[in-house]
Amino acid sequence: MDKYILSLDQGTTSSRAIIFNHAGQIIAEEQKEFKQYFPKPGWVEHDANEIWETQLFVARNVFKKSGISINQIASIGITNQRETVVLWDRKTGEPIYRAIVWQCRRTSEMCKVIEETGIKNIIRSKTGLILDAYFSGTKIKWLLDNVSGLRERALNGEICFGTIDSWLLYKFTGNHCTEPTNASRTLLFNINTGKWDDELLDIFEIPKEILPKIQPTSSYFGKTEKKYLGAEITISGMAGDQQAALFGQACFDVGDCKNTYGTGCFALINTGKKPAFSENKLLTTIAWDLGEGLEYALEGSVFIGGAVIQWLRDKLGLIQNAYETEALAHSVEDTAGVYMVPAFVGLGAPYWNSDARGTILGLTRGTTKAHIVRAALESIAFLSRDLIEALQKDCGTRISTLKVDGGASANKFLMQFQADILGIPVIQPAFTETTALGAAYLAGLYSGYWDNKDIIRENWHIKNTFKPKLDLYKRRRIIRNWDKAVKSTLEFKL
Ligand code: ADP
């Protein structure tokens, strides 16, 4: 009887279930979207029960679709949207409040107040993060401060906290555990010791009683209760989405780097067994723990990546769909001097300017739709290049190739331009579902479905390599122009 791995990919807008075979190929997949709640400007919530129900629904349906039986599943891996917070009743398993999503800005002011107490360096050296509403710590504090009676119940041990990995695990198995990639995004986890940190817990006034136990990323987390999938199946891998993608891209060695081109762009570089601390406000994060100790990565993100293409479609009406941008960009020789800086929500690393707003520069009467579309695609590559340059500076190594994934990485113009301005080959793998695949690998390595990482390396195949073609002189010139466009953008204030 052939065996498979089931990967559960719990994302920000949908829950997915994918069955993989030994070659890392997709046998079947199922996806279900769920509701986004925006109760106030800048606030974002999910219904934790709906997350669980949609995840269970797709897990059950993927078997119906594939004809594979649950008994053919060797083990299950979970990957998830990171930083999102769920608090629930330890006895009943009922959520106390809606899940507060990573995008939610409700604790921005709280972060400023905490920062004034002079704890910036402690946060940086212990967590590798910056104090920002994005991470879990202040979201948990907000719930404890604002839900009546919750702090007392938490101190009495009646309440569980979890990121989404932990929440799903609890629902499937009754166990209250997490692992370091998710823990390292909470502001409560010490990346040097690999443990929850008392000083950090004091800073955020969070009682220890609510915390899940931390286990290696690839380890035994428990068995699913029979009533859910029809059999007890071992969950043996859990990781946050970006780290799972790094693993799925087989970025196992120091200096291996991937960039995901989704709504935003996320670049991670493997820095090995030691944390590298950034001079450019990049984040130090846990890559994984395979049971042999912590491994680290540096991470940076571009806020608006593929989203600039959605903007061209939905707000400007310049295109009907994202796909047509490739042909439009190719229809002109260059942007005819047009540069777009899509700083719609400020600029992230290495600029870190939250007041910046988007610009289009260099317009003439000769500017056409194709020039604008091309400038938008180029901006995704320029912003990613800025990020990757910062990653290289911080870890003191040159990146020799860049592995890519995510929806917008399907755009061949974008990938070629990325190679041209980085001056290194950009490599598109055959299987682009790297996040779900990474979780499957983490689970399957522990359960013995895959013997070792070498098999994963062998499974990883190249679909396309985009070699840099632009001559050095031209590359320098357009990068200089891009830098000028960013400078003008940062100077512009209403
Ligand atoms: P997420 O996981 O963040 O939802 P995806 O990886 O699904 O994102 O990628 C979707 C994003 O990629 C959208 O912002 C979309 O505009 C962009 N995108 C998808 N296909 C293309 C394409 N062919 N060219 C450019 N951008 C694209």
Image (cartoon, rainbow, N blue to C red):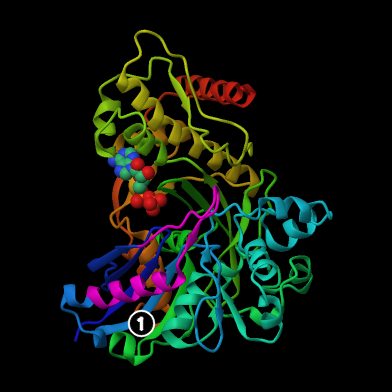
In which quadrant of the rendered image does the C terminus lie?
top right
Outermost residue to the left: 67
Outermost residue to the front: 148
Mark 1 secondary-structure assignment: strand
Outermost residue to the top: 365
Count the marks: how many?
1
Whether residue 103 is in magenta: the answer is no
**Residue at 38% in and 19% down:** 335
Outermost residue to the right: 117
Whether residue 37 is in magenta: the answer is yes
Residue 454 occupies which quadrant of the picture? bottom left
Residue 236 occupies which quadrant of the picture? bottom left
Q: Residues within 10 Å of mark 1 (few under 14, many from 20)?
A: many
Instruction: Reply above or below: 213 against 187.
Output: below
**Residue at 29% in and 58% down:** 431
Q: Amino acid at mark 1?
A: Ser
- Counting from the top left corner in percent of width and height, residue 380 is at 44, 36
> Taking the image as four quarters, which one is ligand 1 found in?
top left
**Residue at 38% in and 90% down:** 225
In which quadrant of the rendered image does the N terminus lie?
bottom left
Q: Tell me the residue that label 1 is attached to.
A: 75
In front of the other: 212 or 277: 212
Residue 476 visible, this angle: yes
**Residue at 42% in and 46% down:** 263
The range drawn in magenta is 34-62
Instruction: Reply above or below: 130 against 341.
Output: below
- Counting from the top left corner in percent of width and height, residue 182 is at 55, 68
Residue 405 visible, this angle: no
